[in-house]
Image (tube, rainbow, N blue to C red):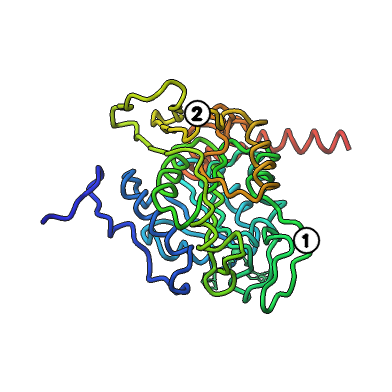
Amino acid sequence: MATRENKIGLQRNDYKGGNSTLCLGCGHNSISSQIIQVAFDLAINPHDVIKLSGIGCSSKSPAYFLSRSHGFNSLHGRMAAIATGSTTANTSLIAVGVSGDGDTGSIGLGNFKHMVRRNVPIVYIVENNGVYGLTKGQFSATADYGQELKYAGVNELPPIDICLEALAADASFVARSFAGDANQVRELLKAAFSHHGTAVLDIISPCVTFNNHESSSKSYPYGKAHEEPLQDITFIPDYQPIVIEEQEPGTVQTVQMHDGSHVVLKKLDPTQHDPTDKLAAMNLLEDTRKQNQFITGLIFVDKNRPTLAETSHMIDEPLAHLSNDRLRPPRETLDKLVNHLVCCD
Ligand SMILES: Cc1ncc(C[n+]2csc(CCOP(=O)(O)OP(=O)(O)O)c2C)c(N)n1
Ligand code: SF4
Ligand SMILES: [Mg+2]
């Protein structure tokens, strides 16, 4: 049987990376597989992609997918700054970033929030396991309050909610998922790739070595027993006609994305959440946090927020493609500027 090719003539293998060196069963590995699948399904040209990360087991993941893409493994917690610079200098890049709960929620929280408020165009994945996996299982900022781990002791601090932090920073796309729910991760990733701006995906991704006890909200047993999806999500790319099954009124919501694709949300409870309502999204996160519920799905989307390039009134042509004479001001302009500064000293 012939191997299937996508719209640009590539096979799934063309989207793979190196072999993973992470622990067998680590949630991060299953997220990498979904990124490979989604990039293949959406026929993304690997050469157009820049993969970004910080430091951590999660941040090693970009080595395991899209080996033909550009990549930058930054300092711990500094991926957001590199994403801001690289996507501003070259607006033709499709950015995908992989971070951890420590990388984003602890050391990188300030960088993360400024990237979100600027609406830097990137699919920003937080592989959230509640611990610093790479440095052997210390509590991260998303660890459960009162949780006890063999080596780390008892966590006496309340957790940070990545989705709530993103919303507070005016995020334009916020979703939560579970690495054990491959279908949902895949559809949310597709929606995130077609979003115009920062798409934050907080994916609970169990660390099987340091934090997979039943009592931890970041474990496989807890996720499997408690996951409550908000919607059944189907992503329809712009080149496919949308055919929506007959449903009871009010149970299906279709969101048309900037690139003409559609995200079809079949609500599991018709009285439930409207992802275009920001206040409802914040209430949902706060209520479910208080009740220890593990909700997943598309939490918030705003298709109309301008990206950083738009608020900065950048030209359509990527700066990285301009020749030096077009990029630099002419001598007379520089002289005028210097004279102005000297006279106004
Ligand atoms: C400036 C700095 N401080 C501390 C460290 C040590 N360090 C490396 S990875 C890491 C935490 C990673 O945790 P997380 O982002 O949750 O990733 P995980 O390994 O859990 O996937 C820390 C504290 C570092 N590399 N650099
Ligand atoms: S230590 Fe934890 S986070 Fe790191 S690779 Fe192993 S299972 Fe994954
Ligand atoms: Mg972690």
Residue in the foreground of this view, choosing between 159 and 31: 159
Spatial CA distance of label 2 from label 1 is 36 Å
Residue wearing tag 1: 157
Q: Horizontally, is 160 left or right of 226 in the view?
A: right
Residue in the foreground of this view, choosing between 12 and 322: 12
Judging from the image, what secondary structure is the residue with disc 2 in?
Answer: loop
Task: Estimate the x, y position of residue 188 in percent, counting from the top left.
Answer: 45, 43
Q: Quadrant of residue 242?
A: top left
Q: Is residue 51 visible?
A: yes
Residue wearing tag 2: 270
Q: Please name the residue shown 78% across and 61% down the image.
A: 157
Residue in the foreground of this view, choosing between 217 and 134: 217
**Ligand 3 quadrant assignment:** bottom right
Task: Estimate the x, y position of residue 178 in percent, counting from the top left.
Answer: 50, 54
Q: Please name the residue shown 42% across and 71% down the image.
A: 20
The quarter of the image holding the C terminus is top right
The quarter of the image holding the N terminus is bottom left
Amino acid type of the residue that numbered disc 1 sits on in the rendered structure:
Leu
Q: Residues within 10 Å of mark 2 (few under 14, many from 20)?
A: some
Residue in the foreground of this view, choosing between 73 and 278: 278
Which residue is the extreme one toward the top? 249
The mark total stands at 2
Q: Is residue 85 visible?
A: no
Instruction: From this view, report whether residue 245 is shown above or below residue 109.
Output: above
Task: Estimate the x, y position of residue 179 in percent, counting from the top left.
Answer: 47, 57
Q: Earlier in the sequence, mark 2 or mark 1?
A: 1
Task: Estimate the x, y position of residue 173 in percent, counting from the top left.
Answer: 56, 38
Dot 2 and dot 1 residues touching (CB under 8 Å) = no
